[in-house]
Image (spheres, coloured by chain):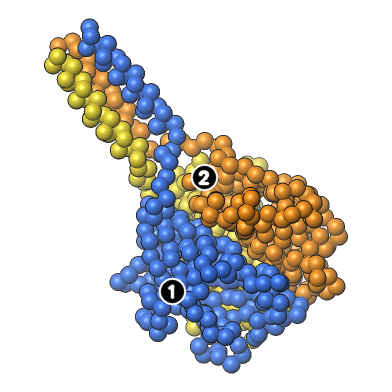
Chain colours: A orange, B yellow, C blue
Amino acid sequence: MAATRLVSTILCLLLLFSSTTAKKIPSRRREPCKQMVLYFHDIIYNGKNAKNATSAIVGAPAWGNKTILAGQNHFGNIVVFDDPITLDNNLHSNPVGRAQGFYLYDRKDYFTAWLGFSFFFNSTNWHRGTLTFAGADPLNKTRDISVIGGTGDFFMARGIATLMTDAVEGEVYFRLQVDIKLYECW
Amino acid sequence: MAATRLVSTILCLLLLFSSTTAKKIPSRRREPCKQMVLYFHDIIYNGKNAKNATSAIVGAPAWGNKTILAGQNHFGNIVVFDDPITLDNNLHSNPVGRAQGFYLYDRKDYFTAWLGFSFFFNSTNWHRGTLTFAGADPLNKTRDISVIGGTGDFFMARGIATLMTDAVEGEVYFRLQVDIKLYECW
Amino acid sequence: MAATRLVSTILCLLLLFSSTTAKKIPSRRREPCKQMVLYFHDIIYNGKNAKNATSAIVGAPAWGNKTILAGQNHFGNIVVFDDPITLDNNLHSNPVGRAQGFYLYDRKDYFTAWLGFSFFFNSTNWHRGTLTFAGADPLNKTRDISVIGGTGDFFMARGIATLMTDAVEGEVYFRLQVDIKLYECW
């Protein structure tokens, strides 16, 4: 009888415990399931560099044009890009993919941008698939944007990407370091 | 022996129960883990209000220009914005952040828009971080768009934002009420 | 006593098992919780088809204009669209919704695009709500983009959409088949 009572107690406790865990999603850990650091390189078309340019101004405000980024901190410029992605910070390294999409400058009184783009990987010895990013870029030293989806090797991924401007050469070239931390991996 | 049989039965039942819960993600509740109501204020550049404008037309169809929203329900206009966010509906309240991104008008026969933007919070006494939004805006009384990601205080957030046009003054000013319900909080 | 020892052993094992499952999110299955195949139809404004056009060029590079897609694989063109969605591949079938948003061409040396758009469903006998998509489109035979959010009947949905160009007529009409697989349904 003592054994039976003990068993009943265990049963009650465990059912209680089980029903508690069943009701709520386990709290999620803020440790990335995947992390990688990549670079991409943007060469803006300026009317003279058609051969090398990887991006072009395609939208401009009333006071702007398509070959020079507009005054007032480029407010209103939309730039479309297809930039090489490299594993180190060398423009001439073998690209592992292309960064494709757009950015726009959205503030008059200082530099801020908004980005929507994908990393498209098509590498036989690295990765295949895409990661898609969106978010505000306050152009601080580092800034976080969202990884909003993935396909292929990055099926259904979500996470955070920390951007850092790694180099700027006038208004023609810049290089971004992208520290990608995925927190949802399938 | 009776106690042992009872224990075996409990064991079987519990293993069955545990393996069932292990196989499927617990069904998720449609109750927000965070909710907030915010306002943002858009003052479109019209060629005369450069000082106050917070947005500008940067894309226009063949029949449009950059200082007046195009005919045919503004079809084809892209507007880039950096708008103040306030906790109440007063344009002159102290902003808690900036709404940054773009909207575009995508239909000839009546007003519809598509939005991609972020709320960028940089407040010492409210929140720091971003929420990023995307979605179709049929310009009904209320309409839902998606919260597709977050950073900082809104790390990895997802949810739904219900937009309501709270005021319109001609084609120069509008104010949106944004009722944000997050269903994924980390 | 034997029964009590047995019970203790079971208790330990089950607690161990339960605490293991409580700590990690159950691994997720790559089986869609919802799948559907839809079509949408894009008729680009070319200066002569204002009545039928469902999309228009609104951004162009320095060498482009708003009525003809630019040379160099349309690099730099942004197109805004509001296209009918049908359940089969017939442009004249009764639409169940509208595909609204934009695409842009982002590469000089061959066709690649980037898309941000929503499916807006407002059907009394099919679905109501939205799905929002974003991603790179390499314009291969099939290509995957991300479903980054949903509202209404598709509350909080996420998934993958496989695009296939189903028909092209010159530079005026194309039809995309969209095979949507949702992996997160609420």
Q: Quadrant of residue B140?
A: bottom left
Neighbour class for label 2 at 10 Å: few (<14), some, many (≥20)? some
Give above or below for B66 relative to B102.
Answer: below
Say which residue appears at 38% left-offset and 49% top-offset.
Answer: B30
Q: Residue furthest bottom?
A: C48
What amino acid is labelled 2 in the image?
A: Glu
Q: Residue furthest top?
A: C1
Q: Is residue C185 left or right of residue B159?
A: left
Which residue is under mark 1?
C39
Q: Quadrant of residue A57?
A: bottom right
Q: In the structure shown, which secondary structural element does the residue marked by tag 2 occupy?
A: strand
Neighbour class for label 1 at 10 Å: few (<14), some, many (≥20)? many
Say which residue appears at 80% left-offset and 67% top-offset.
Answer: A52
Q: Tell me if residue C35 can be seen.
A: yes
Which residue is under mark 2?
A184
In the foreground, A179 or B45: A179
Q: Is residue B53 left or right of residue C38?
A: right
Q: Quadrant of residue A30?
A: top right
Say which residue appears at 59% left-offset and 54% top-offset.
Answer: A128
